[in-house]
Amino acid sequence: MDKRMTADEVAAEIRDGMTIGIGGWGSRRKPMTLVRALLRTDVKDLTVVSYGGPDVGLLAAAGKIRRLVFGFVTLDSVPFDPHFARARQSGAIDVTEYDEGMVAAGLSAAAKRLPFLPIRAGLGSDVVTTNPDLRTVTSPYADGEELLAMPELKLNVALVHLNRADARGNAQYLGPDPYFDDDFALAADRCFVSVERVVNTSELSSAPVQSLLLNRGAVTGVISAPHGAHFTSAAPDYGRDEAFQRHYVASAKDPDAWPSFVDRFLSGDEARYQSEVARFREAAA
Amino acid sequence: MRTARRSESSDMRTDVTRSEVAVVACAELFRDAGEVLASPMGLIPALGAKLARLTFTPDLLLTDGEASLLDADGNVEGWQPFKKVLDVVVPHGKRHVVMGANQIDRFGNQNISAIGAHASPDRQLLGVRGAPGNTVNHRTSYWTPKHSTRVFVDAVDVVSGVGYDNARKAGLAASRFHDVHRVVTNLAVLDFDTPDRSMRVVSVHPGVDVKDVLAATSFPLDTSQATETRLPDAEELRLIREVVDPKATREKEVPA
């Protein structure tokens, strides 16, 4: 089955009020082409689950997020995303804040079709007081420990960006870290995978077999998206575009500067974005 | 030879900077740690962990900040993606993390999430990250480059890292592996080795008065056992300056 589709076709599948999981970690291997496609739609009131980076900042700035489920939002080399900070400080979005390990446990529970997984993380912290719906579970064995029952984090849609895939949806990461992209995929009803390059199945064997993170049974659609993680990293294809990330941060910090960033980089289609980025890089070089 | 070396080393030690004292104090966090993963967040703790491995804790495990474990010679000796960290490394407990703290209180509760009310923060920070899980699973220390009453507060706004009082209140599962070890700052080394597990001064850095530490802390501190933080020895100083941090980036984090 040929599952290739465009980023705009993926975005058209996202409806108001859906719960969307976004793969990657911080400012690393984020499905930015798919995020940018979402920015071009009228969709709103999303619940976003993310190990947050600029995906969260951009979606928050565009008013797409009603609730964020997160453990952190960071741009790694820059600690804070200005848009996320503003969205929080102005009360524009609601949040469900968990420990990083709790997010992993919630995705894992959803992937395993379990209502919860027990976890120690969160106990004693304000994760418990700020999430009054969280419950504990007491071990039925002799130890009797009372642990947090991390509820499953079920997703309507997962968006992830990997390095390679074939047209059928067998998808491969070539960098050092899979992050939680396989959990996001299996926690979701449908998973859309953008990749740097769509290749023949036979070409997937050029890397070790364990790099095949997602098999086609877990993948709904495949999107060819060269530089599709920009400006986050997609090792080994490219690293983070630090100069561009700094430009994003400076623009996001300054409400007067942000409209011109949007106008130049986000008001057109993905091809326009990539060509403007190329021009930006030439000017910086 | 010996005499010449000793006099050279004593010359070197007269100009030891505060940041170098802090690096050694961070290295001391890992003394006797053995074959444990050190996860230092921030520059000075990272330099300290490297120094510890080059000197008195050679078995320490360290990452490259991404998914690889690197040995002291820079060889990749292991694979440790984020998923492995959260799935097994943290819960398994053979780890000592050194985190930063936007706020910390007298029982070692730490905040890196937000300043102000969580529902409508005055200032959004990183989020709780792994702090809740770290603190109830394995040894945790803190590093703060600017010891001040803004950081050392009566009560943190959002409990991210769990302190001794909250761990106790949350029951056995929270306190079983809870182990907040030390707090290292630009002024002092502190720990929680008191009857009620409140913070006390272990040592003040050379040139710092105990009064300075008290003035920079919002809550009372037990200072009865306070000594002076040790200086790096000659070999440690050489390693800091020539091997671990030849570009002296440490001096920017803790100005002399």
Image: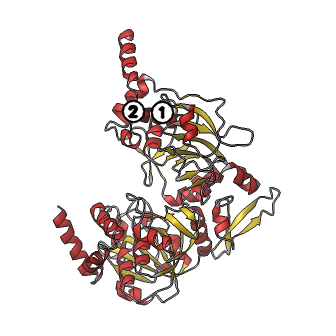
Say if mark 2 contacts mark 1, CB within 8 Å. Answer: yes
Q: Quadrant of residue A221?
A: bottom left
Compared across the picture, whether B128 is left or right of A14 comes to: right
Give the tally of numbered discs: 2
Read off the residue under disc 2.
B240
The answer to whether A111 is drawn above or below residue B255 in the figure is below
Mark sitting earlier along the chain (2/1): 1
User: Visible in this render: residue A225?
Assistant: yes
Instruction: Please give the name of the residue rendered at 40% of the width and 17% of the height, measured from the top-left corner.
Output: B10
Q: Secondary structure at mark 2?
A: helix
Front-most of residues A176 and A153: A153
Chain letter of the residue beneath label 2 in the structure image: B
> Compared to B158, does B72 lie above or below?
above
The quarter holding residue A112 reads bottom right
Which image quadrant is residue A97 in? bottom right
Q: Which residue is mark 1?
A: B24
Q: Work out which quarter of the rendered image holds the N terminus of chain B and state it.
A: top left
Which amino acid, by three-letter code, is at mark 1?
Val
x%, y% of residue A240?
32, 62
* Tags 2 and 1 on a common chain: yes
Residue A167 makes an appearance in the image: no
Towards the viewer: B201 or A120:
B201
Q: At which x and y percent is residue A280?
A: 21, 69
Q: Report the disc number at residue A233.
A: none
| Residue at point 67%, 65% (across, down) | A128
* A114 vs A138, nearest the viewer: A138
For label 1, the SS is helix
Q: Position of residue A50 (x, y in %)?
A: 49, 71
Q: Nearer the viewer, residue B190 or B181?
A: B190
